[in-house]
Amino acid sequence: MKKLVSASVIVAVMATLFVPALAGASDSRLGRLHRNRMEIGRALIEVQSTNWPSVLPYYTNDIEYHDPIVDIYGKDQMTEFLGRLFGSSPDLVTTIEDETLIGGVYTATWTMVGQFSGVPYSAKGISIIKFRRWSTRVHYQRDYYSENDIMINIPGLDEAAIGFRTFYRCSVDPTFDCPLVREEASAASKIDLATPALSPDDADARERGLFWLRRRRMEVGRSLVEINPGNWQSLLQYYDAEIEYHDPIVDIYGFDTMVEFLGRLFGNSPNLITTVEDESLVKGIYTATWTMAGDFGGVPFSAKGMSIVKFRPWSTRVYYSRDYYTEGDIMIGIPGLDEAIAGFRTFYRCAVDPTFDCPLETPAFLADLGTEDRTEDPQVAGSFRLKQNAPNPFNPVTEIAFTVPSGGANVSLRIYDVSGKLVRTLVDGYEPSGERAVVWDGRSDAGHLVASGTYIYQLEAPSFSEARKMLLLK
C-alpha cells in the first residue's frame, strides 16, 4: 500500500513538473508557426520581379489561385503564371496596409503600383491565403482587385472604364456632380435618419466581456456584408457617425452620406443578395469573402468579392468599411461595355495565363509554342530541329541545341521576353550542317542580367521557324 501511495505521489509530482513544460513547448511551437505564417503570407503578397522564384517552395503542388480574370491549378501553372506576370510587370511593387491571421487563414489589404505591359497604374486590393494544417505551405490564394484600374490608362479602353464609373457614381454617390441626365433619385435615398448616439450593444459591452463582444462583432460584421434591400435601414445603428466607406469607385465619409449611398444603391439594386463564404475576426477587424448576385440598374450580374470592417474599441460600432470586387463583373453584362471588358480580359490572359488558348494575333515566334512534347517524325530526319533547352528551369546558364541539315544554312537563334521584345541574339549567320549547341548566360545583348521569368527562344532558317519556352529562376 505504501509503495502504491509513493508511486502515486511520484506520478503527481512528475505531472506538476512536466505538464506545464509540455504546455509551454506547445505554446512555443504555435507562436513560431504563427510568426512564420505571417512572414510567408506577407512575402507572397509583396513578391516582386526580383525575388518571385524564392516564394515558390511555399506553395503546395496542388496550389489553387484565383484573381478576377485568371484561375490557376497546380504548382507548374503557378510558376509559369508568376513568370509571365513579372515578365509583363517588371517594376510591380505591392505594399501591405492591414493584415490578419487566424485559423491558418491569412488576409491582407494592399496597394499596388507599377506597369502592366507598359501601362502605368495604381490599384488597391485584398488577398486571402490558406495554409495546410500545421504547415507553412499554402494551398489556396485569391486576390481581389478591379481591372478598371489598369484599363483606365489604356487608350481605347479608358473611355469604357471612365464611362462605367461615371454611370455608377451618378446612380449611387451623393457627393458626385453627375454630368449625365438622370431620373429623380429613388425615394429610398431621401430617408432622413438621425445619427444614432450608441449602438444597442455599446452601453454594457465591457461588462459582458470579450467572448460576448467577439460573438456580436462577428454577427454585426456578417450582417453588414450581407446587407440587403430588406434590412439596410435596421443596420444603420451599427455605423459610426464618422463612418468611412470605400469600394473600387466610391468614397463615402460620414453617416448622412452613408445613408444616402445605401438608399441609392438598393434603390437601383432591389434584388441584391450577398452571401458570406469565409470570415475571420482579429483585434476588431472583420474580414469576409462573399458572392453577390442580383442586378444593378436592370443589368444582371454575379460577382465575388471581399470586405474588411473595422470596429471601435470595446464597441460594435463600425468606423471603416471597404469592399473589394471587380467592376468587370457588372460591365460584362452592359451592351457597349461588354466588348471592352472582354477585350481587356483576353489581352490579360494572353499575357499571363498559361492555360489560355490566346485568340489574338501573336508574333510568329509564339505560334509554335507548346511543342515541347511532340515526337520526332522519321520522315523529317536531316531537316532543321530545335530541341528543348537544358537545364530547364535554369540558373544561371542553359544550353540550346539545334540541328542544321546537310549543306548548312543561314540561321538565327534569338531570345524574346513574353511581350515579344528581343532580349538576345545568340546566332545570326551561316552554320554548317550537324548538331549545334549554344549557351545562354541569362544576359541581354547589352550585357545586363535579365530578370527571372519565362522567355521564348526562336530558331529561324530558310523555310523554317520554330520557338520554345524556357524558364529562368534566380
Image (cartoon, rainbow, N blue to C red):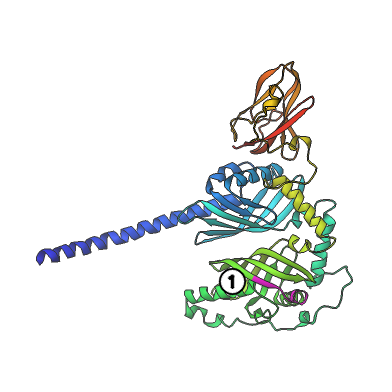
| Front residue (pair 223, 273) | 273
In the picture, residue 323 is in which quadrant? bottom right
The residue lying at 67 percent from left, 25 percent from top is 402
Instruction: Label 1, secondary structure: give it.
Output: strand
Residue with the most extreme right position:
181
Task: Say which residue label 1 marks.
Answer: 311
| Front residue (pair 315, 60) | 60
Region in magenta: 265-274
- Residue 171 on image: x %, y %: 80, 71
Amino acid type indicated by mark 1: Phe
Horizontal placement of 61 versus 371: left or right?
A: left
Quarter of the image for the N terminus: give it: bottom left
- Residue 6 on image: x %, y %: 14, 64
Quarter of the image for the C terminus: give it: top right
- Residue 283 on image: x %, y %: 53, 67
- Residue 119 on image: x %, y %: 77, 47
The residue lying at 25 percent from left, 62 percent from top is 15
Residue 312 higher or lower than 73, as above or below: below
